[in-house]
Image (cartoon, rainbow, N blue to C red):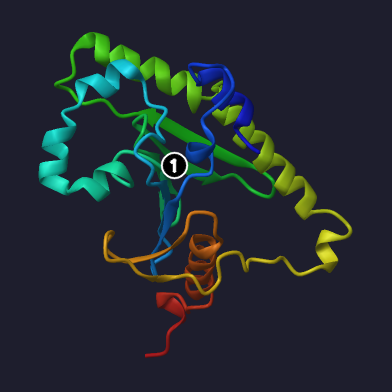
Amino acid sequence: MSHASALMVMSPTGRGPKKEIAERPGKQFVSPNGHGAGFPVHERNRFDNSVVHEYYDYDALRERLGDKRVTGPMTNGHATVFPSFSYLPVNGSIRVWHPKGPNKMEVWAWTVLDKSMPEEVREAQRLHNLRTFGPSGIFEQDDGENWSECQAIAGGFITNRVALNYQMGMGTEKEDPDYPGTTSELFSDAAGRSFYRKWRELMSTPAWHEKEG
């Protein structure tokens, strides 16, 4: 499991999260415009910094946003706004993806801080981001390995002769009563299908100077 070793290091016991947290329920948001988000909904499924966590007034957030949104997408998970802006609410990480040609991607990343945060909270958030999803972060190292290997395999002999399978979670998309919009299961290709569906639409639509009249 990706991130298993990192979660073990960060857990209080050193053995990783409990079974009910590791096998957590969750949702994946799907947008017809290519946006997507995935987020667990278990109230204990968090790995934010303790100093930052204690700073936030979660009662006020729940009053404003509702319990479901605060437990899930507003403070946890990951998301991408089509086509190239991503963010991680849990540690204030935002990033923009810049394709640099075949097999190359440049990522610009920032840590978002509330300007009203005390200095010690700001520093805790900055360090937590660096240690988890910064360039040398323990989670980012896992993801970077996964992405580079996926790209390498995509150019392989077998891969170029077999259709890719994006069917995970197919048929589970539905209008969600708790979270506005369409959601699927947490582990699903639904958001990926939506992303590439929108990309195909844009790539096959004539540009303004190609349209007649």
- Residue visible at 53% across and 61% down in the picture: 192
Helix, strand, or loop for circle 1?
A: strand
Q: Where residue 135 sits: x, y (%)?
A: 54, 24
> In the rendered view of the protein, which quadrant contains the C terminus?
bottom left
- Residue matched to label 1: 96
In the image, taking residue 109 as reference, residue 144 lies left or right, namely: right
Q: Where residue 95 sits: x, y (%)?
A: 42, 38
Residue that extends furthest to the bottom in the rendered view of this protein:
213
Q: Is 150 placed above or below 179 here? A: above
Q: Badge 1 local density, few (<14 within 10 Å), some, or many (20+)? A: some
> Which quadrant would residue 138 be assigned to in this image?
top right
Residue that extends furthest to the top in the rendered view of this protein:
120
Of residues 138 and 106, the one nearer the viewer is: 138
Q: Where residue 27 sits: x, y (%)?
A: 42, 55
Q: Is 33 placed above or below 47 here? A: below
Q: Is 209 placed above or below 151 here? A: below
Of residues 28 and 194, the one nearer the viewer is: 28
In the image, taking residue 57 as reference, residue 96 lies left or right, namely: right
> In the rendered view of the protein, which quadrant contains the N terminus?
top right
- Residue visible at 47% across and 80% down in the picture: 210
- Residue visible at 16% across and 47% down in the picture: 65
Of residues 66 and 24, the one nearer the viewer is: 24
Residue that extends furthest to the right in the rendered view of this protein:
157
Of residues 110 and 8, the one nearer the viewer is: 8
> Which quadrant would residue 111 be assigned to in this image?
top left
Q: What's under tag 1, amino acid-wise?
A: Val
Q: Is 82 placed above or below 114 here? A: below
In the image, taking residue 100 as reference, residue 127 lies left or right, namely: left
- Residue visible at 59% across and 21% down in the picture: 15
Q: Where residue 66 sits: x, y (%)?
A: 17, 48
